[in-house]
Image: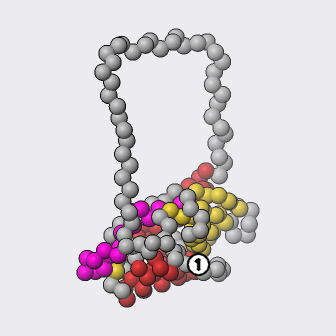
Amino acid sequence: MTARQARPRTRELALCGAVGLSLALTGCGGSSDDTKPPTALPAASSAAPEPSASPVDPDAAVKAAVLASYSSMWVEQMKAYRVASPDGTKLDDFATLDALSAFERDLATMKKNNTRVTGGVGHEPEVTALDLEAKIPTATVEDCIDLSKWKAERTSGEVIPLPTAQPLRYVAAATVERWDEDRWMVTEYKPDGSRSC
């Protein structure tokens, strides 16, 4: 079982590491000097009951298992990026060598350049396709990768900014397959910096 190898992010990002921009969202609250008492709510009407919620997705449990494996891969990957080494992680519990090869190239480059990641990567993954009838059941996960909190630095503490061409939010797709013992494994990971999200 082999899958095409894919790079997890642009070459520039792998070579440079990065410091993500911190985006602060502020809410505006208003105060009112109006001291009038609130208007009473209208009495409940005897209208027909609300229609029931949409039916439950019969594949919800499978999709949750797929997303759990994908998310676990990222947790382990970020552990590796913090020390520029896969040692002590469980990456191979959640992803195959084909999917991991690009991540391992990133780690080798980081180690060579004495860099590490201290920030994080935001995710909004969802299962966009599911084929449970295939010989090897397969799912496709689309994720919105958010680098706004990505921060990289040299081991000396010098911050390394993201390349100016690096989008802060872009789409990545992963292929996830169900292997023995009902274990879902990421077999391919492919970012697409041309698709923002």
Q: In this view, does 127 lie above or below 58?
A: below
Secondary structure, mark 1, is loop
Residue under the point 35% across and 66% down: 119
Nearer to us in this view, 20 or 116: 20
Q: In this view, does 98 lie above or below 74?
A: below
The single residue placed furthest to the bottom in the displayed view is 112
Residue 160 placement, left or right of 130: left
Residue 111, position as x, y percentages in the image: 37, 85
Q: Mark 1 points at which residue?
A: 6
Residue 19 placement, left or right of 56: left
Q: Does the magenta stretch include residue 77?
A: no
Residue under the point 74% across and 62% down: 133
Nearer to us in this view, 176 or 113: 113
Q: Does the magenta stretch include residue 146?
A: yes
Nearer to us in this view, 82 or 169: 169
User: Callout 1: 10 Å neighbours few (<14), some, many (20+)?
Assistant: some
| Start-end of magenta stretch | 144-160
Give the image quarter of residue 142. Answer: bottom right
Residue 85, position as x, y percentages in the image: 38, 81
Give the image quarter of residue 180. Answer: bottom right
Residue 116, position as x, y percentages in the image: 34, 77
Residue under the point 37% across and 73% down: 161
Of the 4 image quadrants, the one containing the C terminus is bottom right
Q: Can residue 6 be seen from the camera position used here?
A: yes
Nearer to us in this view, 79 or 7: 7
